[in-house]
Amino acid sequence: MSYIRRLHKTVPSVSHPDPVQPARLPTSLVFLMASGAGLSVASLYYSQPMLGLLGPAFGADAAHIGLVPTLTQLGYALGILFLAPLGDRYDRRRIILVKAARLALTLLGCGRAQGLGGLLAGSLLLGITATMAQDIVPAAATLAPEAHRGRVVGTVMTGLLFGILLSRVVSGVVAAEFGWRVVYVAAFAGMLAILVGTWFGMPRFHPTTRLGYGRLLGSMGQLWLRHGALRRAAFAQGMLSMAFSAFWATLAIMLLDRYGMGPAKAGAFGLAGAAGALAAPLSGRLADRRGPELSARIGAGLAAFSFAALALEPLLSPTGQIVLLAVATVGFDFGVQAALVAHQTIVYAIEPAARSRLNALLFTGMFVGMALGAAFGSAMLARWGWMGVVSFATGAATLALIVRLVPRIGRA
């Protein structure tokens, strides 16, 4: 115990939202934050390419097994809304450690689930505990020097986005070769590694407010009403996330039904989407140089165009359809991620002392969109087929673009 106390005393602290910082953060710290964000948020998406296996394993049809990603995204939204604001009130390092431990145990529990009810309950809890990613990103924004904040946040977001996209590849391949339970057990081991790295490598943070929990949550309503820029960012990113989730929550089922592609090939589409993660550092640099508004508009426009292009599928051969699907996946992933980094840059600049609460509001909107997208996407696929999903995603992304192009929307 005395060794642990001495270790804590040697860890540097952050005393206020924007402390004097070195010109650049240590590469190892940025890598740790990017890896932690990526592996934690990856937990939300392991199930998506495995739905074709999970349904038969639990005797569930497409509608019921579709509740797995829906509840995961809903849990994430609830966790962001009710837990992420605590980063302004308590040491973010301690919060990250607690969530990492609980996330690891939840992953292990999902891997051992014996019935659909247990998996659904685990999926909801998985979403709640995976919100450690939303403690890491504000920590990165706080540690980063102001002149390079967009770049640092963009780099951490690259890790987060690679976690989102490559999780589908890994889970699809591993599930096809070794079974779906192995995916969750391997994720459990990865999260333990992040827990150890965070213990030794993450600096401590002092709180920026002394508000009690009730008043802390109440202040989020005041922030929402006070800042039109926050409302616009949350709504636009929520619409983009709705389109994003509708696509990914239905892709594996569509590929299996139409092309006979199993979870490994469905997950491989994550490789195409991973190219879109390159948008994060590029968008961060553009936001530092030209302002985040331009990045947000470019991202939303590219996403809307890419989804709309999928309407050309019926005119192409089966090979051409797969190529178009891959190209569009790169395009809309690039656009969605570019817009996200731009919106984070906008929001983090509003009130530095309230970054965790502002981040919670932004990502609550985003993951409510994710949950609704998964639900609506599954319903569209069941009733109107793949073109119904494409139409829904195109409409949602276009609405996000309108919000960014019309400055009056969301202003007080």
Image (cartoon, helix red, strand yellow):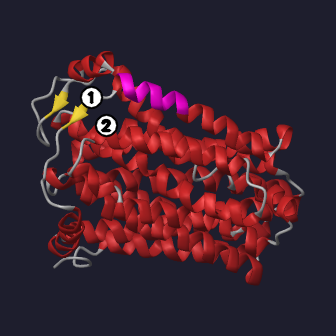
How packed mark 2 is, by other alpha carbons closer than 10 Å (few <14, some 14-19, many 20 or more), is: many
How far across and how far down the image is residue 305, in percent?
53, 64
In this view of the protein, which residue sits in the foreground, 305 or 130? 130
Looking at the rendered structure, the secondary structure element under dot 1 is loop
* Location of residue 177 by image quarter: top right
Tell me residue 383's x, y (percent): 75, 84
Nearer to the camera, 167 or 119: 119
Left/right placement of residue 406 relative to residue 190 reads left
Residue drawn at (33%, 55%), measured in percent from left and top?
84
Residue 284 visible to an observer of this rendering: yes
Q: Residue, x 36% and y 28% (percent of image)?
A: 30
* Residue located beneath label 2 in the image: 93
Residue at horizontal 78%, vertical 47%?
Answer: 180
User: For numbered disc 2, what is the local secondary structure?
Assistant: helix
* Residue 285 appears in view: no
Q: What residue type is labelled 1?
A: Pro
Q: In this view, does 311 lie to the left or right of 341?
A: right
The crowd level at tag 1 (other Cα within 10 Å; few <14, some 14-19, many 20+) is many
In the figure, 176 relative to 220: above or below?
Answer: above
Q: In this rendered view, identify the residue nearer to me: 402 or 60.
A: 60
Residue sticking out furthest to the front: 1
Q: Please name the residue shown 40% across and 37% down the image.
A: 97
- Magenta region, main secondary structure: helix
For disc 1, the marked residue is 203
The spot of residue 197 in percent (x, y) is: 43, 25
Q: Distance from label 1 to label 2 (Cα)?
A: 7 Å
Region rendered in magenta: 192-200
